[in-house]
Image: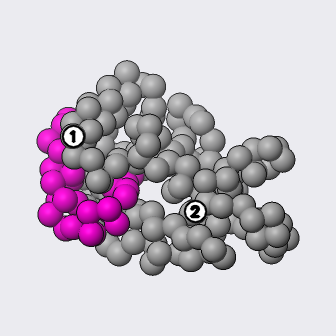
Amino acid sequence: MSWRSLSVLGDAGAGKKTLVACLIYMCGLELLQLEELERKGIQSGDIVPFFEERGQPLCFHAPSGLFKIERSQTPGVAIWVVDGSDPLTWVTSAQRLAAMLSSGEIQPRERLIIAINKMDLVNWSEKTFKDAVHVFSALNLNEGFRIQRAEYTSRLEGAFMGNWSISTTVWGIGRGVE
């Protein structure tokens, strides 16, 4: 099975590293890596540096294939992470994404996913989710993209890892290239 590239983008503080750490922890750690993380007391925010310091690729397995997280202008899949707890940033975040798409700075080949993160800070409010979806849906992101679905789904079940937990949500607007 071949690797697919994944870029995780978004505004500062939106939770990109936490999302990457959660994906790797839940889907990409080998037993020896897990044991080393636990032995060294590595916390969620330190998983990405843990891999980077060792020169190990940021990878995980998903039902649709193997993913390698990398900075790429043309990833197979791009995830744009939005801070769901800060509605004052949504419009500028959406405008930044639209500008990156229209300028060609980011050109996902297969799919663009907009993940509304930090929903635990707003008590998993469906209204907040719908409001964020509305902000991103109102923009003409690119003629090559269309909304496939906007799902209000459960979080990553509060993945508990040793003495810390990640409650990153992967709620989002899926967009596919036509």
Residue 118 screen position, x and y as percent: 37, 58
Residue 11 screen position, x and y as percent: 40, 37
**Could you tell me which residue is drawn at 27 percent across and 69 percent down?**
124
**Could you tell me which residue is drawn at 56 percent across and 77 percent down?**
160
Q: Quadrant of residue 139?
A: top left
Name the kind of residue labelled 2 in the image: Leu
Q: Is residue 72 left or right of residue 35?
A: left
Q: Which mark is residue 88?
A: 1
Numbered disc in front, either 2 or 1: 1
- Of 66 and 84, nearer the camera is 84
Spatial distance from mark 2 to mark 1, Cα to Cα? 27 Å
Q: Is residue 173 left or right of residue 3?
A: left
| Residue 144 colored in magenta in the image | no
Look at the image and tell me whether residue 4 can be seen: no
Q: Quadrant of the N terminus?
A: bottom right
- Of 55 and 175, nearer the camera is 55
Name the kind of residue labelled 1 in the image: Leu
For label 2, the residue is 23
**Could you tell me which residue is drawn at 53 percent across and 55 percent down?**
18
Q: Earlier in the sequence, mark 2 or mark 1?
A: 2
| Residue 117 colored in magenta in the image | yes
Residue 130 screen position, x and y as percent: 17, 59
Residue extent of the magenta highlight: 113-140
